[in-house]
Image: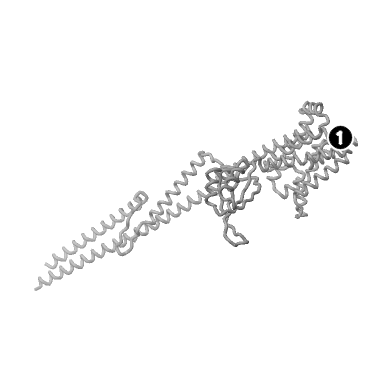
Amino acid sequence: MSRDKTKNNTIKKNLEDSASTNNIKKETKFETDKEEIVVKESDISKSNDILLKTENKTEDIDKKTAKKEAIKKNVKSMSIEILTILIGTFVMALGFQIFLTPHKIVPGGFMGLAQIVHDIVAKTGFTFISTYAWYIILNAFLYIYAVKCLGWKFGIRAGVGIFSFAIFGMIIENTNLVDPITEMIKTEAATSYILYAIYGGVLMGSGIGLVFRGNGSTGGCDMVALVVNKFFPTVTTGQIIMFVDGTVVVLSVIAYGSLVLPLYALITIFISGRVSDMFVDGIRSLRAYYVVTDKKEELSQAVFNKLNRGVTNLKCEGMFTHNDRDMLLIIVRRSQIISLKKIVKRIDPNSFMFSHNVKEAYGNGFIAYSNDKIKKNKKFKNINQEQNIVDNNVQNLEDKNNLKTINPKNEIIENNDKENLKVENKAKVKKTNLNKDNINKTNKNNKNLNNKKATKSE
């Protein structure tokens, strides 16, 4: 009986030991699972920190490159504008010195006013200040005020326009570069003041148009308009220009004692204004046609196929019948007007059509927008490399977020990114090896205790 009891006790103890070892295994597994979760959370937090740092670096790089590119674009555009302004003021100086000044035809604006002031003062014997010096003096105070109101960019362009015109005029006047041309014109067309007025206006208008194309200014009426609009907002720039030019023409009557020369001056002012508008608005003449029709599809297809032009459908309502109608907008060149009229007449003779002039049209089929081509250099390659690094870090984060994390209920972790989790796997292997060693030690200790108890009982 005593032997049976000892056997039963040993069996119970063995069962208890096996249960304790199983509990130890479960606890160690649960601890390893927890440690794996902590490792994954720490890796995700580290990758988030790396991502934030890389994003901040890329933002700084983007800002720096954007600033550099903006500076380059500003410098390039400013240099092109200044070049066009210089060409324009040189053409103006040629026209002013060849056709207008020798024949006392005033071009209007502050240029004509400077010419009148110079000629009136010269009658008193004071000839130390030239016409171009008077031009700078008249513009000086208005120029300072305009720079304060419109900023330094306008100040640069306007300053280049004012001073370059004066410098070119002084060079042409003092070096006698155009004297052979003026002498030839005087001998062949001694009394043809109409030619002086026309060609002087053409050259002056061409130069002014180039200056306007360069976003510049030659001072004078533009700055007067700025000052007047500051105190009298209802007065327009056109009214101010007409007033200044009219004042200059009236003063030319007093200065030269002639009623004929101011008439030629009016021709010069008119032609220069028209020519400068052509330079600003462009020579290409377009026309927009609006067609109210019930056959929009047939008309549109005919315009597409025969004129190769786009058509825009505008919904409208006839106020007499209150019916919904379709109105087609078609922009064509002058050479296509007759063909469009024939198409509309053939397809829908009952349509209603009207038109108006178009100065400019940008887009497909017309004036193309300028595309700035960015050169690929080493800086952009470095930026692309850094951007690729950021993209890889983002992809790694997404892969880590797609992992199924472990929980205490023996759920399985699916590792989808082996390369990025090598460090994590090494840590797991070390910890699992330590846990196995601990389990083996506990098992050996338990076996030794069981053996000792069994020998004692026997």
Front residue (pair 222, 331): 331
* Image quadrant in which the N terminus is located: bottom left
Residue 89: image location, x then y, percent: 72, 37
The correct choice, above or below, for 2 with respect to 276 in the image is below
Pointer 1: what residue? 127
Image quadrant in which you'd find residue 211: top right
In this rendered view, identify the residue nearer to me: 64 or 195: 195
Q: Residue at x 51, y 39 (%)?
A: 376
Residue that sits furthest to the bottom in the current view:
1
Kind of residue sitting beneath label 1: Thr
Q: Where does the image place residue 217, in percent across and percent down from the top left?
A: 72, 43
Quarter location, residue 455:
bottom left
Estimate how packed mark 1 is, as few (under 14), some (14 to 19) or many (20 or more) residues with alpha carbons within 10 Å.
few
Horizontally, residue 444 falls left or right of residue 47, namely left
- 331 up-or-down from 40: above or below: above
Q: Is residue 204 above or below residue 293?
A: above
Q: Is residue 207 left or right of residue 309?
A: right
> For the view shown, which residue lies furthest in the right direction?
124
